[in-house]
Image (cartoon, grey):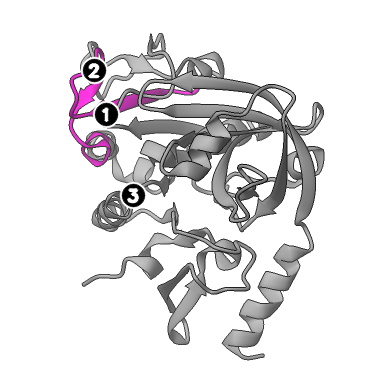
Amino acid sequence: MTATGLATKKAQKNRGTLFVEDAEVIAVKSFPGEQFITRLTAPKCAEHAAAGSFVHIQCDESMPMRRPLSIMRTDADEGWIEVLYKVVGEGLRALASKKTGDMLSVIGPIGYGFTPSPERPKSLLIGGGVGIPPMVFLAEALTGSDATWQPLVLMGSEIPFPFQLTNSEIASKWLPDEISSTMPLLEEWQVPARLASLSDFAGVYRGYVTDLACEWLSSLDQDELAQTEVFACGPTAMLKAVADMARQYDVPCQVSLEEFMACAVGGCAGCTVLVQTDDGPAMKRVCVDGPVFDAATVFPVA
């Protein structure tokens, strides 16, 4: 089968798990910087979603164009999903204005998510800005699946984080004690996490989240690095820096790409990116061929 044929087959398989649901707004939480977390009833999406997959939401009946949003959390038993987003444009402003009981059309889950390798249980999860949601999803999935996983979550933001900062009781011998702020939810799950910013937030590492990641990676010996794998989502510049860092420390890395999307189901090819494959360079659709890719194939050595 040709590479094009394989891509089509993969996309068709992906469409077999897509569901269109009338989702009810259960809760909306607002945070500084026009950031919001919206919880929606979407039982089929909640059942089939994986860390890294996303939904395509109709923000308002007056707006035919949907918005792609990464899934941050799901509960298959209760049938809900959560999305975290920052208001950019009228679509997300309309979504943020929704009240409990309002109904929205949701398509999902879309895309192929992260695939952690069991032989590398030391998982470094890096989220920047709107790239935070998939890292929260992945952290929860790893924590709930097998006690052998050892996730570390690092998050960066130049605006206030979309949660109330709390001091972590989980020790981090690789950082000064005063760098202790974390996300309450991760602390509740007993997942070690630290934050990075250039905005001088209390208890937060001053620098880029990739600088913080290098602090941790440089504290590992070769045996520990051989057990490490990196997962990241965030702005393209950050992802490139993460890919370069992973190459420097010789650890595998998966990145979830954030691209503008129109259809989000593989029909319009508006979200294509250049990816290096075994058969040479190829244009891949972020929505159905991704959004998760091997970092080295998207950000090869220049």
Which label is found at residue 196? Answer: 1
Question: Quarter of the image holding residue 95?
Answer: top right
Dot 3 corresponds to which residue?
Answer: 235
| Quadrant (top left/top right/bottom left/bottom right) for the C terminus | bottom left
Image point 59% across, 30% down: which residue?
A: 140
5 sits left or right of 123 in the view: right
Magenta stretch encompasses residue 194: yes
Label 2 environment density (alpha carbons within 10 Å; few <14, some 14–19, many ≥20): some
Please say if 139 is above or below 235: above
Residue at 61%, 42% (x, y): give it. Answer: 59
Rendered location of residue 217, percent (x, y): 28, 40
Label 2's element?
A: loop
Badge 3: few (under 14), some or many (20 or more) residues near its Cα, within 10 Å? some
Residue 148 visible (yes or no) = no
What element does badge 1 sit on? Answer: strand
How far apart are labels 1 and 2 at the CA level?
9 Å
First-in-chain label (2 vs 3):
2
Q: Which mark is residue 201?
A: 2
Please provide the residue range marked out in magenta: 191-212
Residue depicted at 48% across the width and 62% down the height: 293
